[in-house]
Image: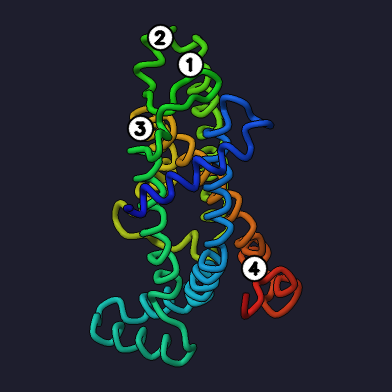
Amino acid sequence: MSVFGLLGDLLAHGAQAIAPFFGASATAAAIVLCTLAVRAALHPLARAAARGEKARAALAPQLTALQRTHKDAPERLRRATTELYATTGASPLAGCLPSLLQLPVFFVMYHLFSTGGSGLLGHTLLGAPLGGHWTQALADGGPFGPHGLVYLGLFALVTAVATWNVRRARAAAARRPDAAAPALPGAAGLTRALPLLSYATLITVAVVPLAAALYVVTTTAWTAAERALLHRDRPAVAAGTSPDSGARADALPARS
């Protein structure tokens, strides 16, 4: 049996266990609970990635100063940057490996909920088939029909999470010490546009099966909440508080 079939069977057994509480929507609830459980298990990797990001952010002012000092000498800039990372013990790739290690798990989960397993897509959420798409919901009763309302609820949640992400990203950018520094041509526009990619999740929810949409919405909401928790001490540091003072109280521990 493939890994997808095995996971599908486990999910089916989980849905049976919670059926007394969720009725016909037990499989949909099992998808959400399974997604939350997997994200909780991967949380240590997320903490490691956050520590790496913070290490890079702490070096940002020094890197900016080096870029200004050696702006006309690329080779000197490269050597000075390498020396800075070596001296501080940081790495330009810090935090990337933990993030990459999570990708195979996300792929397996998404594939499972997109293709189904053990009849997964044959179940419903409030009457809307987990194997159905938004276009089918529109055909069955329009955007405000019984099935359409399920998707409108998901769209509303994604929009709320995306808006929160955009506001946090813009607020963090405004607080950065180098926010007023001259930017590369077009960099300012790119910086403003990147947070808007959060709204692209709306397209994903609209085109994938409802089961996969539930997974996408759940993991997106978890990611937003997780990042807010892991980076909750950044505003104080960016506002001028010494990392060795009050901000340290909220910093992540050295080991999970």
Tag 4: amino acid: Val
Disc 2 marks which residue? 140
Residue at the image position 52 percent from the left and 17 percent from the top? 149
Q: Which numbered dot is residue 5? A: none
Disc 1 marks which residue? 147
- Please, which residue is most extreme toward the top here? 141
Disc 3 marks which residue? 208
- Please, which residue is most extreme toward the front here? 1
Q: Quadrant of residue 184?
A: bottom left
Where is residue 112? Give x, y as percent.
38, 44
Callout 2 environment at 10 Å: few (<14), some (14 to 19), or many (20+)?
A: some
- Give 240 or 147, whichever is nearer the viewer: 147
Sooner in the amino-acid sequence: mark 4 or mark 1: 1
Callout 4 environment at 10 Å: few (<14), some (14 to 19), or many (20+)?
A: some
Quadrant showing the C terminus: bottom right
Sooner in the amino-acid sequence: mark 1 or mark 3: 1
Tag 2: amino acid: Asp
In the structure shown, which secondary structural element does the residue marked by tag 1 occupy? Answer: helix
Residue at the image position 52 percent from the left and 47 percent from the top? 35
Q: Which numbered dot is residue 237? A: 4
Q: CA distance from mark 1 to mark 2?
A: 7 Å
Q: CA distance from mark 4 to mark 2?
A: 52 Å
Viewer-side label of 4, 1: 1
Q: CA distance from mark 2 to mark 3?
A: 17 Å
Sooner in the amino-acid sequence: mark 3 or mark 4: 3
Callout 3 environment at 10 Å: few (<14), some (14 to 19), or many (20+)?
A: some
Tag 3: amino acid: Val
In the structure shown, which secondary structural element does the residue marked by tag 4 occupy? Answer: helix
